[in-house]
Image: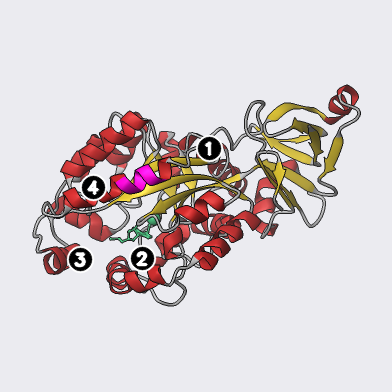
């Protein structure tokens, strides 16, 4: 067992001074530092040092590692041009995404303080890297397919990928299911996949209401998706409506990504049924999507995480870059309150969403934590969350399951 101390430890929404944590692979005791060293005088002590702040390890609930090779290939600015560029370049992007590229993406997350992440896996090509990663990984096997003629074979392929990831289930790896979206998954396989998730009790996620084009297509079978579905899939009508899609998830809490086009009704329904939202501010901006009105989510008490999405719609997987993006995007919000919400969104909230025993400095939880260093002594406690977001690019120390990785 060891003891770690820092100038401040973020516990339950408060920056606690003079605290310490006794840990092995799990957090054993959280107490005033002097009490800990009095009770356990002979243990190794890790001292965060001057101007240090300790947080529960950060959690990125939504990324796509198989698209990590993209830097200059995909078209940004508007959703449909992006989607066409994904379809045109998908094979080349995925084939050129080797182990080194994925490992670099994983390592960038680690350096920014990510100790757990949710990997949306389209083909299972990132499974090895995720298993080898030091992180806690929720491996979301993606189901996609709207054409009734091909959905059954796509579902079988999804099942095989799910089973392959299940072989590695342990404290670090959780197999899970990602429904791609309402526009791209046929209701028949959608229902099968949801009841499968429910049976297996594994985390479930889905992209939802990301673009205006998606809203127009689902509401009216019209808009920018019309030409897309007619030319690629010979399809003239959406396979589902927004209500039908959301209702399918009524009995199983799901993590819905984006929701930038969700209206008050949709958001209320998500709250009522125990769902949560993954907010990807930089991805939304780069794909020409609307701002997610997080003030509404806060009003409705609908939990949200902040996540990076993949390098298919972003320029880094650094979680601090994402938090700074969110801070700038939501320019009307009180800056200190928002900063705290953002920190909570990648710790406590994200841990609950992924069903992991981490994201909180709490006895019995995994000893996943990070220490960051502020450049100078903070003058006011209420500024610490904001200062952390503004001044941190990489963390100073990082532990997962009590082991040091940074
Ligand atoms: O979250 C972003 C934007 N929305 C939807 N899909 C993706 C994102 N980044 C990568 N994707 C992947 C998705 O998993 O794009 C592929 C899917 O496999 C094609 S989308 C028809
Ligand atoms: Fe995504």
Mark 2 neighbour class, 10 Å CA radius: few under 14, some 14 to 19, many 20 or more: some
- Relative vertical location of residue 148 with respect to residue 381 in this rendering, above or below: below
Q: Nearer the viewer, residue 126 or 276?
A: 126
Q: Which residue is mark 2?
A: 288
> Is 82 left or right of 1, judged from the image as shown?
left
Mark-to-mark CA distance, 2 and 4: 31 Å
* First in sequence: mark 2 vs mark 4: 4
Q: Classify mark 3: helix, strand or loop.
A: helix
Q: Going 84% across and 26% down the picture, which residue do you hit?
A: 36
- x and y percentages locating residue 34 in the rendered image: 88, 28
Mark-to-mark CA distance, 1 and 3: 36 Å
Residue 30 shown in magenta = no
Tell me the quarter of the picture where residue 91 sits: bottom left
Tell me the quarter of the picture where residue 357 sits: top right
Residue 17 seen in the figure? yes
> In this figure, what is the number of numbered marks?
4
Which portion, as a residue range, is magenta? 160-164
Q: Going 48% across and 68% down the picture, which residue do you hit?
A: 98
């Amino acid at each position: 067992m060891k003891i770690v101390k820092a100038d401040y430890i973020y516990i339950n929404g408060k920056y606690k001074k003079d605290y310490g944590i006794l840990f092995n692979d799990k957090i054993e005791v959280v107490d005033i530092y002097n009490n800990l060293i009095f009770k356990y005088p002979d243990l190794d002590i890790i001292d965060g040092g001057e101007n240090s702040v300790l947080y529960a390890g950060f959690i990125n609930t939504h990324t796509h590692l198989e698209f990590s090779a993209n830097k200059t290939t995909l078209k940004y600015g508007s959703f449909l041009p992006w989607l066409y560029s994904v379809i045109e370049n998908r094979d080349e992007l995925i084939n050129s995404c080797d182990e080194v590229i994925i490992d670099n993406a994983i390592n960038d997350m680690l350096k920014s303080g990510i100790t757990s992440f949710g990997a949306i896996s389209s083909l299972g090509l990132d499974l090895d890297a995720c298993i080898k990663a030091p992180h806690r990984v929720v491996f979301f096997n993606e189901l996609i397919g709207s054409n009734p003629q091909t959905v059954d074979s796509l579902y079988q392929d999804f099942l095989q990928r799910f089973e392959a990831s299940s072989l590695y289930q342990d404290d670090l790896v959780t197999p899970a299911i990602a429904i791609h979206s309402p526009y791209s998954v046929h209701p028949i396989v959608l229902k099968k996949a949801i009841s499968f998730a429910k049976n297996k009790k594994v985390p479930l996620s889905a992209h939802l209401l990301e673009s205006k084009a998606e809203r127009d297509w689902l509401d009216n079978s019209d808009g920018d998706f019309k030409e897309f579905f007619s030319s690629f899939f010979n399809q003239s009508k959406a396979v589902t409506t927004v209500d039908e899609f959301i209702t399918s998830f009524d009995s199983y809490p799901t993590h819905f990504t984006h929701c930038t086009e969700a209206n008050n009704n949709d958001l209320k329904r998500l709250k009522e049924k125990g769902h949560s939202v993954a907010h990807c501010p930089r991805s939304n901006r780069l794909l020409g999507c609307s701002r997610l009105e997080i003030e509404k989510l806060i009003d409705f008490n609908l939990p949200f995480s902040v996540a990076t999405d993949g390098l298919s719609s972003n320029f880094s997987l650094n979680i601090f870059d994402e938090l700074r993006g969110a801070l700038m995007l939501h320019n009307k919000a009180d800056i200190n309150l928002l900063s705290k919400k953002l920190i909570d969104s990648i710790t406590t909230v994200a841990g609950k969403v992924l069903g992991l025993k981490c994201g909180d400095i709490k006895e019995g939880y995994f000893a996943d934590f990070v220490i960051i260093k502020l450049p100078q002594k903070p003058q006011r406690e209420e500024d610490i969350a904001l200062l952390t977001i503004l001044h941190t690019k990489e963390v100073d120390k990082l532990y997962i399951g009590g082991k040091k990785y940074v």
